[in-house]
Image: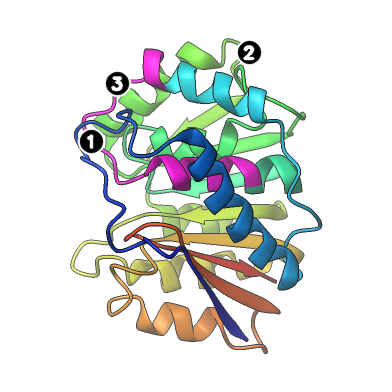
Amino acid sequence: MAQRFEASDWQTYKMDFQHPHREIEPVEREIAIVDKALDALISAGILPHKEYDHERFRAHRAAVRDLFEIPWTAITPRLQRVLYAINAITQPRVMVATGIFCGNTYISNAGAAIGPGACYTASRLVGIEIKPDEAARARRNVARVDPTGVGEIVAMDGVAWLRDCTEEIDLLYLDANGAGKGKSIYLDMVQAALHSLRPGSIVLAHNSQNDSGTLADYLAFMRDPKQFRESVNVVVDDQGLEVSIR
């Protein structure tokens, strides 16, 4: 069953993709908007609560700002907080992120378990990027905040990796672009991963708002109660994040 959360200013809240660390709004407003989004996920039965450590998140954000090489990103400060919070709250044992580019999307999820924002211990945190050069850059970026080496970056096709996965995936993040398919590759990816998604597994899909047309088949699949129990389109910015629970 599809649900939707909209920040009242999502259409005017915009970030310069080349300068992702510039403040867009007071942090107090950012926190308030994200809290409302988390409330919507609680109401849908996707999250059990909305408590996460704000100081650890601040340390995570500072480390990414100071240590990551990010040529550009569409992950807004609000969405960075949403992704961190969902992972900090659900504490996925196995987290897989696809289409991670330079690693910023990966660490927005994995940062709840590695680096200065860590609040729990995961068993596996996988980032998948099909372009070898970007996978290498992501690996370098992650190593700067994760000296333990728990973070795992692989350079390969995400559909193939998910199809061959033999573990249960607790949280799957989708942000890939398929050759000739664009964001519609999300449907291929989630279908390839179905055998690894247990009841209660969460799937996060970026660009659910600005690419909703391309994602029409994916969104229909995720909002089919025969496939996923609940799905909420979280629109805190003009990009959007579909949050679904198996």
Q: Give amino acid for label 1.
A: Trp
Q: Nearer the viewer, residue 94 or 31?
A: 31
Asked if the residues shown at circle 2 and circle 3 are in contact, with their CB atoms under 8 angstroms apart, the answer is no
Classify mark 2: helix, strand or loop: loop
Q: Nearer the viewer, mark 2 or mark 1?
A: 1
- Residue at (33% x, 38% y) in the render: 24
Residue 243 falls in image quadrant:
bottom right
Above or below, 149 against 61 in this view is above
* 204 left or right, relative to 114: left
Mark 1–mark 3 distance (CA, rounded to whole Å): 9 Å
Asked whether residue 142 is drawn in magenta, I would say: no
Q: Looking at the image, is mark 2 or mark 1 earlier in the sequence?
A: 1
Q: Give amino acid for label 3.
A: Glu
Magenta residues, start to end = 65-85
Quadrant that contains the C terminus: bottom right
Q: Give amino acid for label 2.
A: Thr
* 238 left or right, relative to 49: left
**Residue 69 badge:** 3
Q: Which residue is mark 2?
A: 148
Residue 115 falls in image quadrant:
top right
Classify mark 3: helix, strand or loop: loop
Q: Which residue is mark 1?
A: 72
